[in-house]
Amino acid sequence: MDSILVRGGAELNGTIPISGAKNACLALMPAALLSDEPLTLTNAPRLSDIRTMTVLLESLGCEVARLQAGRVLVVGTERISNHTADYDIVRKMRASILVLGPMLARDGHAVVSLPGGCAIGARPVDLHLKGLEALGATLDLRDGYVHAEARGGLKGAVFEFPIVSVGGTENLLMAATLAKGTTVLKNAAREPEIVDLAECLRRMGARIEGDGTSEIIIEGVERLSGATHPVVADRIELGTYMLAPAIAGGRVELSGGRRDLVAAFCDKLEEAGVEIEETRSGLTVTRRNGRIRATDVVTAPHPGFPTDLQAQMMALLATADGVSHLEERIFENRFMHAPELARMGAEIDVQGGTARVTGVERLRGAPVMATDLRASVSLILAGLAAEGETRVSRVYHLDRGYEHVEEKLSACGARIERIGEAAE
Ligand code: EPZ
């Protein structure tokens, strides 16, 4: 299995291009199931999660063409030939549940394996299911699968999410586009990925208002057509690479980055003493002298501080001057990077959902292990600032969500390389 070797201590200077958002693309691809005409997605990221979604869609009868070395995806679903999303694919990636709403909306039936828990928490899909029931679906849970039916078609309804769910909002948003009548989603997620999905669905002919607010109104239509849609920039990749010069020092431009995608995160970085400038082509992050200031962070649904940047922020605060508190409010088990960072000399005390981080002057390189996608990149970031060598193993997590991480960082002067199994 590949690992990543980082030799710390180099300042970073240069430009990092930001790719299309993994989590937007994972919702946009299933949207193609809603129409018998092809959906073309440009600015698609080249990641293993996108390949997993491709395999899932192909198993349902879609044709997926990868053009321009995978930057453009054309998903055609003339006919859904198989309405069962198999456990073997769904267990690899929770976002597979997003095929449920579209298949049900288009053909009135679907069978999807339940995803099960994962490294960061139990992560149930009960809200996806309750929402679909509110739209008139009949659900039966058997043998680990959801058997869903709406033979007469889905019907518009008012559904209020008891807690904000990104995936739940996406599934219902897609399903409601073809339901009869009006659907109102209350306490809906406001993430940029939701706005991007709504924008794409509108290009396909859907009638949607209010995306980006907590109340989304969808007027069902008879059919949707094909469309071409550019995937929004990946705000988590953006935030991650903004932290690279913040941790290692230097000045890096993130081309394609937008402050509005990560506003709460930018506020925190500035509070910690990092300079951020908006430029014509993106954002520039500068860290010159002195230590980072300690700051407290609480994760929350958008527009709050994203849970998907909590691990990376912890790597920064590990070297801050003073004590920081990081409170994780979205997932119950998302501090698995803390003991790994501790192996590099970080002082972190986790009590329930809060981590108390006492900044140290310097981290020291160590062999560490990635436990999930964001944890793995937090260890790479920590390695950039550490004395000596950090070797991150289990990097298949990284490849799920970061395209060419070694190339992007080494282009700015980082000493980082991938070590293949054969070389180990
Ligand atoms: C999306 O997951 C992202 N994944 C996650 O990114 C991200 O961490 C998360 O949103 C929160 O921002 C994709 O977009 C593919 P949720 P999702 O439904 O949709 C609970 C990454 O690193 N909940 O908003 O699964 C749930 O357990 C990943 O790229 C229910 O209780 O997240 C969690 O505590 C990891 N019942 C909270 O709600 C439900 O039916 C928010 O989950 C659904 C969710």
Image (spheres, grey):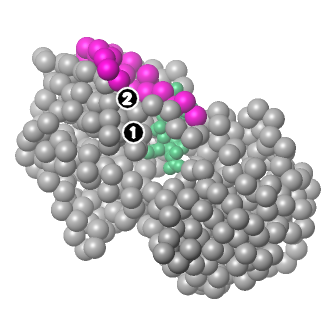
Provide residue 99's location: percent of width, then percent of height.
28, 37
Rendered view: 296 above or below 213: below
Circle number at residue 114: 2
Give the residue displayed 56% in from the left and 68% down from the top: 3
| Element type at mark 1 | loop
The part of the image, by quadrant, that contains residue 319 is bottom right
Question: Who comes first in sequence, dot 2 or dot 1?
Answer: 1
- Is residue 58 visible in the rendered structure shown here? yes
Rendered view: 249 above or below 59: below
Disc 2 under 8 Å from ligand 1? The reply is no
Circle number at residue 91: 1
Q: What amino acid is at disc 1? A: Arg
Foreground: 138 or 113? 113
Give the residue displayed 33% in from the left and 17% down from the top: 141
| Element type at mark 2 | loop
Rendered view: 113 above or below 326: above
The part of the image, by quadrant, that contains residue 47 is bottom left
Foreground: 208 or 421? 421
Give the residue displayed 60% in from the left and 62% down from the top: 393
For this orientation, the residue located farthest to the left is 78
Circle 1 crowding by C-alpha within 10 Å: few under 14, some 14–19, many from 20: some
Foreground: 185 or 292? 292
Circle 2 crowding by C-alpha within 10 Å: few under 14, some 14–19, many from 20: many
The question of residue 59 being in magenta is answered with no
Going by the image, does 368 lie left or right of 28? right
Range of magenta residues: 121-144
